Image (tube, grey):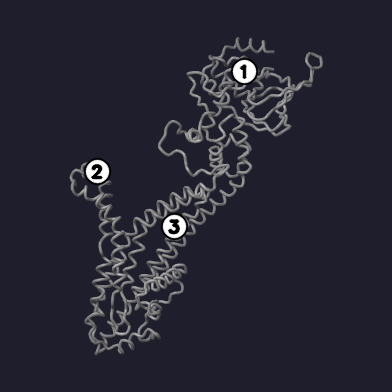
Amino acid sequence: MRKSDKPVPQTESSDDSSIDLASLSGENFLELAKGKYGKRDGGNRSTWSIQCDGNSIQRAIQSILFGIGCLFVIMIYFGPMLVDPLFLYVPIINENIKCLALDEKLKKIAIVLRAFTDLVYLLQIIYFVLPTWCKLNIMEDLLTADEFFVLRKSLIQNILAVLPIPHIVILIFLPTTRNSRSLNRMKFLNSLILLQYVPRAYPMYKVCKDFNKETRERSKELARRKQIWIPGVLNFIMYILASHVLGAFWYFFSAQREIDCWISACRSENGCNLSTLQCDNTPFRNVTLLNDLCPTNPQNPMAYDFGIFIDTLQSGIVGTTDFPHKLLMCFSWGLRNLSSFASNLNSSTYAWESVFVIFISISGLLLFMYLLGHVQIFMQAISKTSKISQRKSVICPQIKFMVSEYRLRSEIQDEIWDLVREALEVDEDNPAANIFSLLPLELKKHMKRYLFLATLRKLPGLENIDRQVLEKIMKHLEPVSYADGTYIIREGEPLDRMLFITQGIALAYKTGTTGGESGSSSTTHIPQAKVYGEELMAWAATSTQFSGLPISDQTVKSHEKVEVFAIRAARLKSIVSKFSTHFNTQDITTVEITSN
């Protein structure tokens, strides 16, 4: 029986568009698999692929640099949320003379840092707004209505974000508070401080939204790169920022709550002068009266109920300039109550205090749900990735063997593992018995051309056949693996498929009789890239119906694990019938008779 020679892995003729896979680098091989070969877009090869051999030091360095870059971006957008609460710590209560002072050192630091954080918004205004302002009519002609609306919306957002509301409210208006009317005005200004957090926090919200969307889509990749900690850091930072902001407002509202008590006491009693609250211009005050009507240590709820703010007043942090001490206490208060959804807070009957407690409870619940959802996503990704990683020690040797048998460059093993891993992420229960079956469709097509095009051109009747016929035959070649000692075809049985052996060695031997005489019992090795069953080409070209299959005169048995590509007789006949005008039946029959 005729066995064709091993294919030469090159383009066979000028009309062939085959790519010599043996000459491709790892980067080009991956581009070919993704359908991007010859279409470079500047960044096709991921620098984060996990290799079969693995360079752990390089991956660790890349992971650290990537994390530092993410943290730098986070600091740019999260900076306003870190700096703005500093203004809330500037007011100081002097309990000895019942007056309000400002921490001058902290005030200067807050103003300078606020100026730095405002640069982000100012640069956006300069970049996006000034050209539009200078050439408004031209821009209106060039931009669509939606684009112009987005531009105008961005302008409004950035302008609102840079307004010096904390400077005006805390550094100017708060010290001038001296009666119930000015106190009501102060409550209105408090709402402005809160509202400015919306435009200033919006860039952070956008970054988090986009980042979380990307990390959800790439959760498996992050888990694979050992970078699953990055989304966790983001969620942790959000908790830290929320605790920082809530703790600062707790401090600020505590000072205002005591001032509110002073004003109420002086309104109901004589002998109390609150023409000004500033300590540097303090008139005579009846401190004893204020201590009696506004007791803080110990508290007398019957006289005045400070509710959730009593801890701040009793600890004395509203009267100290020790900023680290104030920051740690207020931050710990915010973190504890945010984590417990404010369940441990006992508020007074003061309406705005109840609103503040409700806000803490809702914020804690939303952050917890947000964190829980991401934890579930990434735990699933870690679980799936760990299962695939456990299989790597088994799959990588198979890839190495396949690359060797296919005569490809050894450096593409890493790229093949990346492709196999992606396939297993989609179907983690795939047994991966055949590596070829896990490769992308585009790569399979090119590999079939590389492996079989030259061999097919040497089969009887296919030497000068049209390329599209060969493409059709290669399309229907299916990979099949046989374990050691498996009978692939038995002697005396119909040949129902044509086989191309690509990995391993099979044995072909005769044990039956021919023409009534005993045949020889010689054994022949069928090495890699050989073909068995090419008689089916003549049968497919001459037979008018699916009958009279050629009978195998040998038994084919795997000598070791063997990979073959097979095309069934019915499929081969269907292709030949479809392209019958391309085949010369007489030539095929003559060649077959001669070979026999």
What residue appears at the point 56 percent right and 40 percent down from the top-left corner? 417
The kind of secondary structure element at disc 2 is loop
The residue mark sitting in front, 3 or 1, is 3
Please tell me in which quadrant of the rendered image residue 162 appears.
Answer: bottom left
In this rendering, position of residue 436 left or right of residue 315: right
In this rendering, position of residue 58 left or right of residue 355: right
Where does residue 355 sit, x and y in percent of width and height?
36, 71
In this rendering, position of residue 4 left or right of residue 169: right
* Disc 1: which residue: 537
Locate the N terminus and report the quarter of the image it occupies.
Answer: top right
Tell me the number on the disc at residue 143.
2
Tell me the number on the disc at residue 234.
3
Please tell me how crowded label 2 is: few (under 14), some (14-19), or many (20+) other residues with Cα within 10 Å.
few
The kind of secondary structure element at disc 1 is helix
Please tell me how crowded label 1 is: few (under 14), some (14-19), or many (20+) other residues with Cα within 10 Å.
many
From where the camera sits, is residue 483 visible?
A: yes
